[in-house]
Image (spheres, rainbow, N blue to C red):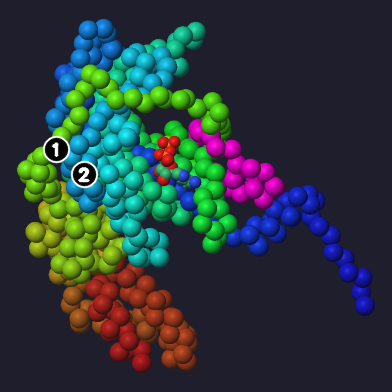
Amino acid sequence: MPPINFKLKPIGIQSYLRIFRGIIMAWETVIGLEIHSQLNTKSKIFSGASTEFGAKPNTQACAVDLGLPGVLPVLNKEAVHMALRFGLAVNAKINQHSIFERKNYFYPDLPKGYQISQFEIPIVGKGAIDISTKEGGTKMVGITRAHLEEDAGKSIHDLYEDYSAIDLNRAGTPLLEIVSEPDMRSAKEAVAYAKKIHALVQYIGICDGNMQEGSFRCDANVSIRKKDTEELGTRTELKNINSFKFLEKAINIEIERQQDILEDGGNVVQETRLYDAVKDETRSMRTKEEANDYKYFPDPDLLPVDIENELLTEIKNSLPELPTEKKNRFVSEFGLSDYDAENLTAQKSLADYYEAMLNDGADAKVSANWVMGELSASLNKNQIDIQDSPISAKELSELVKRINDDTISGKIAKGVFKDMWEGNGRVDDIIQNQGLKQMTDVGAIEGIIDGIIANNSEQVEQFKAGNTKLLGYFVGQVMKATQGKANPKQVNQILNEKLS
Ligand code: ADP
Ligand code: MG
């Protein structure tokens, strides 16, 4: 018997143990999200100051926002209506009596020394929303609550060398904080949920959804536990996440970090961690021991909010078609797959564009492929919003029609699309000017195919001997000979006839 030559790679026994334990201990991830959605009211939640983004620093904070003595906050009715729109859209229990409380803490960008928020009784109670899972099904995610609060100002640390700057323009901007149940089980599900809420707040017109400008901010609470256990593990809260891509990354990094700790016999510390997109890591901001004790108490300057039934009915009736309703309609009315319908309705403007194409008479499935394919790719690449697309829905619909009526092939259409994108005219002119019209003259195509068969006797023999994959080779030859203008369907049909 030959000697057994078995050596561990020098990565340390610890790492081997971790891998081994990782396999036998199946971990389950638990995630809950807190989403701050900036309500797009014209003025602040408790004052008449403007909420416009990008103004000169400290030009939009009034005495109320600054918390100067002798002023009183007055609740913005519009912000309340927006919170109710959200609550009704997620079928939540509306608390028709709610109150505002003071959340006390010290920070330089919080001149009042407290933030007005809701704690004991939020305006929106328990609700739920459905998300699409990667398995292709749907799953309900619980919404614990959604409450109204004011935003703080902004500290800017990189403007001056020796000082931090404070811009109070954002102080008092209305926010709806949407808190989910710990119902997500993977980073992907968390992203699906965040995207769904993102779509919803834009559909119902309460938030512009701009993540770069901070109008839509996600904090992720992450823990892990052994599969099939009830009890939740200790969680950490991840902050400073400003895109869906980073949300997924931050959660996955955190899951791995927690697994490492637990598998090495340690304990996860409950803390807030900052996600650093440049270093692609999370690091500790503050632990539970350092956490503030906010000493919430009802704000004596503000009356309770009492909502009448009539108002709820009125708001309910004013809600537009919601993402899930639209998605279901796209499936039933246009025969789209769940996946396509989900993607097309993820953004209202995208769904509107798509529907405009269908209203113009374009085929549903081919249009869906073009909107999610070439169009979305080009918009993403050039960072253009669909509202500013250089190709209008009507123009793209014309292109789709030319594919469906066999004027051009899908492949040629890609070139036409490029020309349209660059502003070189309308579909029919481009097809005409460049002579791209598909060959439909059967006799002419047959002539070309006969020539190709005569010149490729070896391949013909192989094909007849059973190598049917060679059909692609022949199609390629025909396309080459016709500069891609032969109708692929016809070519396949004629080739099959002639070769068998
Ligand atoms: P806090 O206000 O201190 O952040 P909450 O109890 O309101 O705490 O929870 C905030 C978020 O954390 C919610 O979205 C909730 O679902 C989520 N969460 C709570 N416990 C866990 C846990 N063990 N693992 C993951 N998420 C959790
Ligand atoms: Mg929190």
Q: Position of residue 60 (x, y in %)?
A: 23, 15
- Residue drawn 28% across the image and 18% down it: 169
Counting every numbered tag in the picture gives 2
- Residue drawn 44% across the image and 81% down it: 469
- Label 1 close to label 2 by CB (< 8 Å): yes
Nearer the observer, 473 or 317: 317
Element at label 1: loop
Horizontal side, residue 16 vs residue 465: left or right: right
Nearer the observer, 468 or 309: 309
The N terminus - image quarter: bottom right
Specify the quarter for ligand 2. Answer: top left
The C terminus - image quarter: bottom left
**Which kind of residue does numbered mark 1 sit on?**
Ile
Element at label 2: loop
- Say few, some or many: other residues with alpha carbon within 10 Å of mark 2 (under 14 / 14 to 19 / 20 or more): many
The part of the chain drawn in magenta is 254-275
Q: Position of residue 296 (x, y in %)?
A: 37, 26
Horizontal side, residue 15 vs residue 43: left or right: right
Q: Position of residue 330 (x, y in %)?
A: 19, 63
480 to 165, vertically: above or below: below
* Residue 471 shows up from this direction: yes
Horizontal side, residue 309 vs residue 385: left or right: left
The circle on residue 94 is 2
> Is residue 150 inside the magenta stretch?
no
- Say few, some or many: other residues with alpha carbon within 10 Å of mark 1 (under 14 / 14 to 19 / 20 or more): some
- Residue drawn 28% across the image and 37% down it: 122
Horizontal side, residue 424 vs residue 191: left or right: left
Q: Is mark 2 within 8 Å of ligand 1?
A: no
> N-terminal of the two: label 1 or label 2?
2
Among the 4 quarters of the image, the one containing residue 468: bottom left
Q: Position of residue 302 (x, y in %)?
A: 21, 22
Q: Which residue is mark 1?
A: 307
